[in-house]
Image (cartoon, helix red, strand yellow):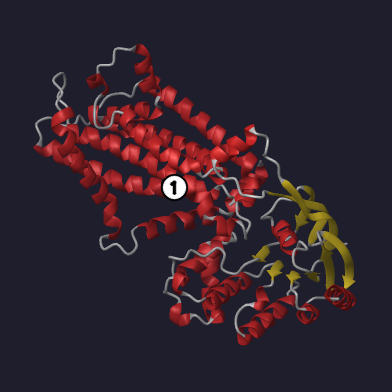
Amino acid sequence: MAQPAIKVENVSVLFNLNNEKIDNLKEYFIKFVTRKLHYNEFWALRDISFTVEKSDRVGILGFNGAGKSTLLKVVSGVLKPTKGNVEVHGVIAPMLELGAGFDMNYSGHENIYLYGATMGYPRKFIQERYDEIVKFSELEKFIDVPVKNYSSGMKARLGFAIASAVDPEVLILDEVLSVGDTKFRTKSEKKIVSMFDKGVTVLFVSHNTDQVRRICNKAIILDKGRLIAQGEVNEICDKYAELAAEKKK
Amino acid sequence: MKKYFRNFYKYRYLLYEIVRKNIKLQYRDSFLGILWTFLQPLLTTIVLVIVFGNLLGKDSSKVLNYPVYLLCGRLLYDFYSQSTKRAMRSIKNSASVIKKVYVPKYMYPLANVLSVFVTFLISLVVLVLFIAYFLIFSPNKPNITPYVFLAFIPIGILFILCLGVGLILCTLEVFFKDVEYLYDVFCMLLFYMTPIVYRIEQLKIENEWIMRLFMANPLYSIVNMFRDCVLFGQMININHLLYSLAFSVTMLVIGVVVFARKQDKFILHI
């Protein structure tokens, strides 16, 4: 059998939530001496295990604070889990926040290369895809303008165009399809669907169950850091709708 | 171990792009652009020569080319203080990337030291111009001998030192912002502790312990070696070489260990 694309084993993440952030020596020292250096411990994820087969598209559902974004951060390698481990096979394109790697003083043109390098791609590789990226982002007129003068929609468009142009094997989407206008949203959804044919594996976070049903074939539900259900997308989405209705009461 | 090298190899373009970005952005929007890499040390050295030249530049025992002497010290000191300060802030300044995308985090301090290193190398042109000028027009010429080619040794050691100190500082900075202010004061102290504008003989230190304190400063050894190569035209002092190399490598080892042990916690604090 083929290797699974993503394998998450018994992953737990512990956050130390300080009541107030201590970032200077004096406070640290005083609190240390007076033994007030206690933390509020908080498990953002508890013992999560699941596997994603190649070219599966998994929707992650959950209410606010359920640990969805934390899970994506762990899978994309930004955050090390406190316990357990994660294996990912293939090239990841993280889209946790579009345009996070941009430098505001750099022009769109320069940022394309910088963002590409942040994902580990050489200049030449990006050069070959440069025209495609610019065309998709529809920023031909503004490509030499510093990104600080872009609107948030423009930044998101450019970020999406770069991240989707590199033919990733694993795509990690954190509510990215909720940015931009309807036209761009439809366009990027189309782009993602077109990548399915190439066998891309997707992890997709959204509150919108309709969107999850359209894009994904499987889904999981997280609640307060625990994995409470996984299975086929329609079944899970129905269950999520029930849960949501229950919460409303 | 092999895994780390492969990862570095994969992200080498990032290193290149950050260095490129830092250099490009540093002088963007300024009228003279990259020319400032020459002009800045040139003008500040002229100011220092005017201020201290009469006071400290006169040396009865030895005919000294004070402007070249001063420029050697200043260029090395500037590289040290700028690269470590920029490396110190590098992790915090890249918080938006580090929080959202996986990148090897050491790339940021490394790239910042490297980009200051590149501008330092460009500014060495000023030193070459200074030396050329004084070789032609001045009675007390700098003594240029084949030893000048050994100048890469103090520069290399200084690079190791900066990288090590930078790694330590950026780790501390993530947890305690005070470091930034303390380090500014420390750098000022270092400027006066290092014989840049004066010669150590001029201080006439008699207390053995104070003398040792001055000698313990690795910049003292490095600056001395550099001057031996490019100004006095003599072989570098082997004690200076061994001491500064040992000091710098120790710093680098401490830096790498501290950074590697704490880097997974960065994201929770930035």
A20 or B196, which lies in front? A20
For residue B120, above or below residue B230: below
Coordinates of residue A115 in the picture (x, y in percent) = 54, 64
Q: Is residue B15 left or right of residue B119?
A: right
For residue B102, above or below residue A197: above
Residue shown at 53%/38% (left/top)? Answer: B168
A150 or B33, which lies in front? A150
Residue to which mark 1 is pinned = B86
Residue shown at 75%/67% (left/top)? Answer: A64
For residue A157, above or below residue B185: below
Q: Quadrant of the N terminus of chain B?
A: top right
For residue B183, above or below residue A136: above
Coordinates of residue A205 in the picture (x, y in percent) = 74, 70
Residue A116 picture quarter: bottom right
Q: Is residue A127 left or right of residue B41?
A: right
Evaluate whether residue B257 shows in this view.
no
Q: Is residue B260 left or right of residue B214?
A: right
Tell me which amino acid carries mark 1.
Arg
Residue shown at 27%/54% (left/top)? Answer: B36
How many C-alpha atoms fall within 10 Å of the one at disc 1: few (<14), some, or many (≥20)?
Answer: many
Coordinates of residue B174 in the picture (x, y in percent) = 56, 46
